[in-house]
Image (cartoon, rainbow, N blue to C red):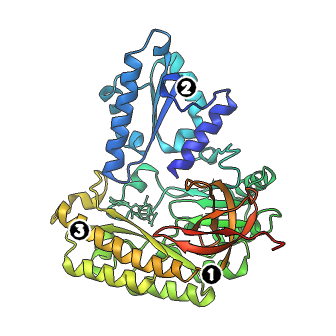
Amino acid sequence: MNEHDSERMLSILSDSGYVATDNPKDAEVIIVNTCSVREKAEQKAYSSIGRYVELKKRKSESEKKRVVVFSGCVAQQEGDELLRRFRGVDIVVGPSQVHRIDELIKQAEIDGTVVAVSPDVSQKRFRNPVKDTNGVKAFVTIMEGCNNFCSYCTVPYLRGREISRNARHIIDEVYRLVASGVKEVILLGQNVNSYHDNSEGELITLYELLASLNDIKGLERIRFITSHPKDLTDKLMHAFTDFDKVCPHIHLPIQSGSNRILKLMARGYTVEEYMNKIEKIKTLRPDIAVTSDFIVGFPSENADDHKDTIFFIRRANYDNIFSFKYSDRPLARASTYGDKVQMHVISERLKELHYTQVGITRKIYGALVGTTQKVLVEGESKKQGRQQGRTAHGRIVNFLGNAPKGTIANVLIDDYSDNALYGKHIPEEE
Ligand code: SAM
Ligand code: SF4
């Protein structure tokens, strides 16, 4: 979501005549777009904004005109306090107002400093002029905010309550993106499963939205993130079989394999209920790839809870997982919970999650060696001399060949690593 907000600001500013630069010294406007989900990200934000205000101080008169913007969730969290802490910051803008970046810059030229952190609950917050992400796939926000208040999470406080975007606006945007060459859209929201729009008198849930997008000619693939397990309905599961463009991949974060911890996290489901949902989807779509998030070291997590998590990872047979060290967030309830887990214990547990999952991923990827996979070509790979793309299951493939960007290439898989597949493009005529 943050990455997409950065793209949106970039796109709005290009429309106003700005040109992006990689060199901060050349920039008239520097925006640090921040995330507050974990403490480490927040600290990184402070150190980069510190660097940029220093840069501003050391410059000549004309360069002092440089506008420094602190945007995103840390800006929302700290508000005008940031102006006092970092002399040289001109604009503080929260995530629901980043669509106003162009007018805020103009306002700062007149007023000196601007703080824009009051939540925008109108459809304007979805203003999204992104023309070109990598040209092949594009993010499309369909809802924002969250009503769940998981005890560790700061999102509902900073991005506000759930608000769904009008379906008509989403569909129009996807038409525009496809006309500009985009082949894959990734529908974004903190909790996409609870998407609902009745602005035109008829209830449209994520299922109906997917049905409409599936009909768009030229669009090849549709993904959506993030799904919340408690809101994943039977109807939505059928989207994986009813619509051929909906990719066979679901990111379904469980966070812990211990029911005691899930209850403390206020996630609203048990391990058994979660597992039932995975089994149901797999009956409908046996090949579906499931990925997940885990938080390691939630307050009071003990050796038995951790064992339950490792056991669950093996049972779920995930394609891959993202695991994070628990981090206290000032606004979240869990920051007041006692019995914090020591950092060295968290690090050990995190390693164990990682190695458990690597073993499973390697088995899944190993079984694909010798098969031909359909890969949407995204461009050059970081691995020299190779191209890169993804399978419909969301697996990264680095391959030898000259397949045109934006096409779906047949790739014969001949190797794999812990996080990618390797292969060779097999042109149609072979
Ligand atoms: N809405 C999504 C869901 O409920 O699954 C998650 C969105 S959250 C921004 C992304 C991930 O960050 C979460 O799934 C969780 O694993 C992790 N996360 C959130 N708060 C955290 C915290 N306080 N400490 C560590 N990880 C955290
Ligand atoms: Fe945070 Fe929970 Fe909402 Fe996800 S569902 S954004 S973890 S409060």
Q: Position of residue 246 (x, y in %)?
A: 68, 72
* Residue at image point 31% right, 26% down: 84
Query: In the rendered image of this protein, does residue 398 appear above or below residue 311?
Result: above
Image side of residue 133 versus residue 114, left or right: right
Q: Secondary structure at mark 3?
A: helix
Q: Residues within 10 Å of mark 3 (few under 14, many from 20)?
A: few
In which image quadrant can residue 137 be found?
bottom right
Report, in whole angstroms, how far the alpha carbon at label 1 lies from the one at label 3: 36 Å
**Residue under label 3:** 348
Q: Which mark is residue 211?
A: none
Q: Amino acid at mark 3?
A: Glu
Image side of residue 420 versus residue 153, left or right: right
Image marks 2 and 1: residues in contact by CB distance under 8 Å: no
Q: Is mark 1 within 8 Å of ligand 1?
A: no
Q: Residues within 10 Å of mark 1 (few under 14, many from 20)?
A: few
Query: In the rendered image of this protein, does residue 57 appear above or below residue 200?
Result: above
Along the line of sight, the residue nearer the viewer: 396 or 219: 396
Q: Is residue 258 visible?
A: no
**Residue under label 1:** 370
**Residue under label 2:** 105
Image side of residue 148 versus residue 409, left or right: left
Indicate which label's residue lies in the foreground, 2 or 1: 1
Indicate which label's residue lies in the foreground, 1 or 3: 1
Q: Position of residue 377 (x, y in %)?
A: 69, 60
